[in-house]
Image (cartoon, helix red, strand yellow):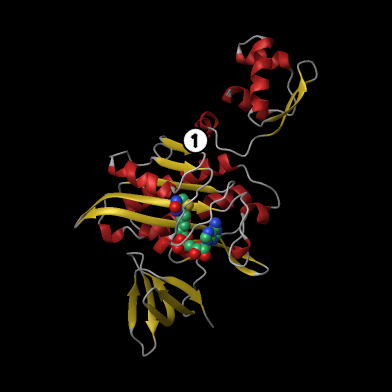
Amino acid sequence: MSPELVSLLSDVRRVSGETLAKKLGISRQALHKQILNLREKGYVIEGQTKAGYKLCSKPDRILLQEFMQGLKTKRFGKNIVLNEKAASTQEEAKILAEKGLSEGTVVFAEEQTAGHGRLGRTWESAKGGLWFSIILRPPFLPQKAPLLALASSVAIAKAIEQSSKINCRLKWPNDILVETENGFRKICGSLVEMSSETDKIRWVVLGIGIDVNNKLPKSLEDIAVTLKDLHGAPLDRSALLQRILKSLETVYDVLVQRGFDEVKKEYRKRSVLKRGQNVLLSNPSSKVNGKFLYVDNDGSLVLSLEGGKIQNFFAGDVTLSN
Ligand code: BT5
């Protein structure tokens, strides 16, 4: 792989073999070999030495060298494990976290065979999505870990909005939705799992699943949608992941250094829940009806229940009701 050649080809409409060889400091023969090599890897490159080369499309895969070249973070993703296929990046990352790998380490998979959400629910993870988990070691109390789901939703929403002009909405605690003509559809879910002592987090693994260019099964048609469908064309997943990691790092640093206030403002702007709205909060063992009041400073959901009691909830699935 030649990331330099890919980036030269990406910069211009058509470029002669002579110019490319000169810029790379290699012979025309060596250049020809690199072009063939890229074509074998799925790059569609039109042309020959004389007429000039043109990069028509890149393979829809995250390729290490190219990815690292465009990654603008300080820590997040600097150490990245790229899997063609994994049972679950979450499980792999938890093992690495336990072994002591540093904050910002990312485990990514092109495809997951046993991806899961909260409460062991299945997460559909066919090729073409972004399925990854990040190791974090936040210096705050374990009670504050749920804030990471809210903060990561804000960061991902911002990155998606910059990459595609798609407006993201957030649903407590961990969903990113998009409003379509058929109602809200989920495009991203996140999962926060941790190991802690009474007053210290040992590690958090933040798992993120984003529907990008993947196909969704029929069973999810009414609740999910992909960015490709919304955008009308496939997205460059490598560039999107680079942008998401940068955004995650920025928002995470704000959360750690300055607290939840700033992030909360960004969260509230995009929240589908508006004050006074009737909601149903479901947990495996209970269902509660109430009016949404606000998201508290510890990330919990504050509802006003029938009879006027005000209560904080730390987990559950929210359904909007009338
Ligand atoms: C979540 O769970 O939304 C968290 C999903 C986290 C997935 C990532 S992928 C990388 C890492 N490795 C893993 O194994 N997991 C993480 P929850 O709120 O429980 O939502 C699960 C529900 O979302 C399912 O019951 C389905 O209804 C729906 N769902 C499943 N697959 C989906 C998909 N690809 N897109 C949108 N919705 C999906």
The amino acid marked with disc number 1 is Leu
150 shown above or below 41? below
Q: Going by the image, does 50 lie left or right of 98?
A: right
Q: Position of residue 272 (x, y in %)?
A: 52, 69
Furthest-left residue in this view: 198
Of the 4 image quadrants, the one containing the C terminus is bottom right
Q: Going by the image, does 160 lie left or right of 28?
A: left
203 shown above or below 36? below
Residue plotted at (52% across, 80% down): 321
Is residue 104 visible to the viewer in this orientation of the structure? yes
Quadrant of residue 53 within the rendered picture: top right
Residue plotted at (46% across, 76% down): 275
302 shown above or below 194? below
Q: Nearer the viewer, residue 44 or 322?
A: 44
Q: Position of residue 301 (x, y in %)?
A: 38, 71
Is residue 169 visible to the viewer in this orientation of the structure? no
- Disc 1 crowd, CA 10 A, few/some/many (<14, 14-19, 20+): many
Q: Going by the image, does 226 lie left or right of 85?
A: right
213 shown above or below 300? above
Secondary structure at badge 1 equals loop
Q: Position of residue 237 (x, y in %)?
A: 58, 43
Q: Nearer the viewer, residue 249 or 282?
A: 282
| Residue matched to label 1 | 71
Q: Going by the image, does 223 lie left or right of 81?
A: right
Q: Position of residue 226 (x, y in %)?
A: 62, 55
Q: Nearer the viewer, residue 249 or 59?
A: 59
